[in-house]
Image (cartoon, rainbow, N blue to C red):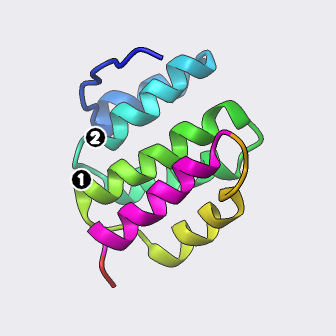
Amino acid sequence: MVYEELTPLTREEGEPLLAHALPPGERSALLLRLSLAPDESAWKQRLFVATLRGPDEALHVAAALALGHLARVSGQVAREEVVAVLLPFVGRPGVGAVAENTLDDIRVFCPE
């Protein structure tokens, strides 16, 4: 895996791109770029949660990681909803460690 620095993307910039059918790698990068900008955190949270609830397992890691970034950048997430959607992923191959890290980010950066 090669580290790639991602530039933050606002909702205004990213929303039109979401309308396109993108390959999983590009869509994953788009989710991560959206998570790095401090605007529209509630909208972004809904997007990431919906992605985790969706059938595309290739995007689950990116959506879980994006929620962790969002917790760090904004300092706020809807804890009950986000924790509930992440818990079933804990222990699953591929996404489990990311889900655990995101839960830790929420505990640290989004105190109750």
Asked whether, in this view, residue 28 is left or right of residue 73, the answer is right
Q: Residue at x 51, y 18 (%)?
A: 26
Residue topped by disc 2: 36
Q: Position of residue 11 (x, y in %)?
A: 33, 39
Quadrant of the rendered image containing residue 107: bottom left
User: Nearest the camera: 22 or 3?
Assistant: 3
Up the image or down, 42 lies above or below 94; here it is below
Up the image or down, 59 lies above or below 65; here it is above
User: Nearest the camera: 99 or 59?
Assistant: 99
Q: Residue at x 24, y 53 (%)?
A: 73
Q: Main secondary structure of the magenta part?
A: helix
First-in-chain label (1 vs 2): 2
User: Nearest the camera: 44 or 91?
Assistant: 91
Type of residue at label 1?
A: Val
Q: Whole-Å distance between the Cαs marked 1 and 2?
A: 7 Å
Q: Residue at x 53, y 43 (%)?
A: 63
Q: Secondary structure at mark 2?
A: loop
Quadrant of the rendered image containing residue 88: bottom right
Up the image or down, 102 lies above or below 77; here it is above
Tag 1 and tag 2, C-beta contact below 8 Å = yes
Residue 73 is covered by the magenta coloring? no
Tell me where the magenta segment starts and ends, as one range: 94-110
Q: Secondary structure at mark 1?
A: helix
Residue topped by disc 1: 73
Q: Position of residue 110 (x, y in %)?
A: 31, 72
Type of residue at label 2?
A: Leu
Q: Residues within 10 Å of mark 2 (few under 14, many from 20)?
A: many
Up the image or down, 81 lies above or below 19; here it is below
